[in-house]
Amino acid sequence: MKIICMEPLGVSSEKIAALAAPLQAAGHEFIYYTTKETEQDKLLERIREAEILMLANQPLSADLINKCPNLKMLDIAFTGVDHVGLDAARARGIVACNAAGYSTNAVAELTFGLAISAIRNIVPCDARCRAGSTKDGLVGFELFGKTFGVVGTGAIGCRVAKIAQAFGCKVLAYSRTEKAELTVAGVQYVTLDELLAQSDFVSLHVPMTAATAKLINAAAIAKMKDGAVLINTARGGVVDSAALAEGLNSGKLAAAAIDVFENEPPLATDHPLLQAKNCTVTPHVAFASKEALEARADIVFANIDAFLAGAPQNVVK
């Protein structure tokens, strides 16, 4: 098999070499690119002959997939897969696998890093301190005793709910499927409207689908509690950025903390959230801890082993 990794996986070359060695010893060809290629014609040159194609969060269109005649497997080193033209893959019987679970702790931890940064004004406090100024006007508020709403209780949402309880929050949840482990722990499942109306914090942990596109729009924000905080470490398209900016600028919401956007950073300088009040932004880093990236590499190489053994794992439906 010709196995091509079209972009770097964020781990050391030694780690990649060690993971690839058994494949190469078995007679498979492995090509690893250490830079991203955004020009589509040049990207096609990289991937055209692949039988197994590895990628992370770089978009891969249906058009490019269809121009790879030998492709048998897509190995996606990411949890979300909406950046990949999967309909084209399915139409050709190409197996697509992801790396679900690799970043559960990393994303959950950053969720609270963002929340605390937003409510305790850490970024502006840093700027004040460096400028020789004081905290005047920057007194924040606490997580303890607040109602924390978790939208989507997959692995990451479950972890977030449990951490919120450890902070002393009452936790509400909304999800297609209720998790017994959360209800036993005291998490209350409610409707989305109830969650929005009652939560001091709303944290998003749903995939990007037709059903979740702009789930948090102007109408949803109007239903939120005055002075609430929105946190998005899920997918950018789940939030209507213009509506969120309006909610922040009007004072309806106290703050927002956003790690994901409609497009991958770098963002246009006129992006509405870059101009919004009390909005903490990070360039899609929730998944990017050393431990998570190491685990991700292990998973995607294990996906190849499973596929070659005739028992693919982590298959995207």
Image: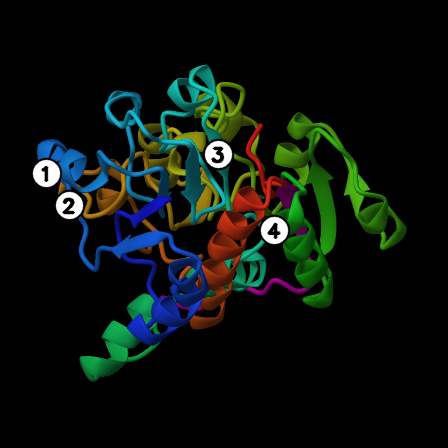
Specify the amino acid type for callout 4: Ile
Q: Neighbour class for label 4 at 10 Å: few (<14), some, many (≥20)?
A: many
Look at the image and give the residue range highlighted in magenta. 137-151
Labels in figure, total: 4
Q: CA distance from mark 2 to mark 1?
A: 7 Å
Which mark, residue 37? Answer: 2
- Residue 102 colored in magenta in the image: no
Q: What type of secondary structure mainly makes up the magenta span?
A: loop
Q: Which residue is mark 1?
A: 42
Q: CA distance from mark 4 to mark 2?
A: 30 Å
- The picture quadrant where one finds residue 264 is top left
- Give 19 or 185, whichever is nearer the viewer: 19
Which mark, residue 156? Answer: 4
Q: Are marks 2 and 1 in contact (CB under 8 Å)?
A: yes
Q: Which residue is mark 3?
A: 96
> Which-is-in-front pick, marks 2 and 1?
1
Q: Are marks 4 and 1 in contact (CB under 8 Å)?
A: no
**Could one spot residue 204 in this view of the protein?**
no
Residue occupying image coordinates x 27% and y 37%: 263
Specify the amino acid type for callout 2: Glu
Q: CA distance from mark 4 to mark 1?
A: 35 Å
> Tag 4, which secondary structure?
helix
Residue farthest toward the bottom in the current orientation of the protein = 132
Specify the amino acid type for callout 3: Ala
Residue 233: image location, x then y, percent: 46, 48
- Residue 145 colored in magenta in the image: yes
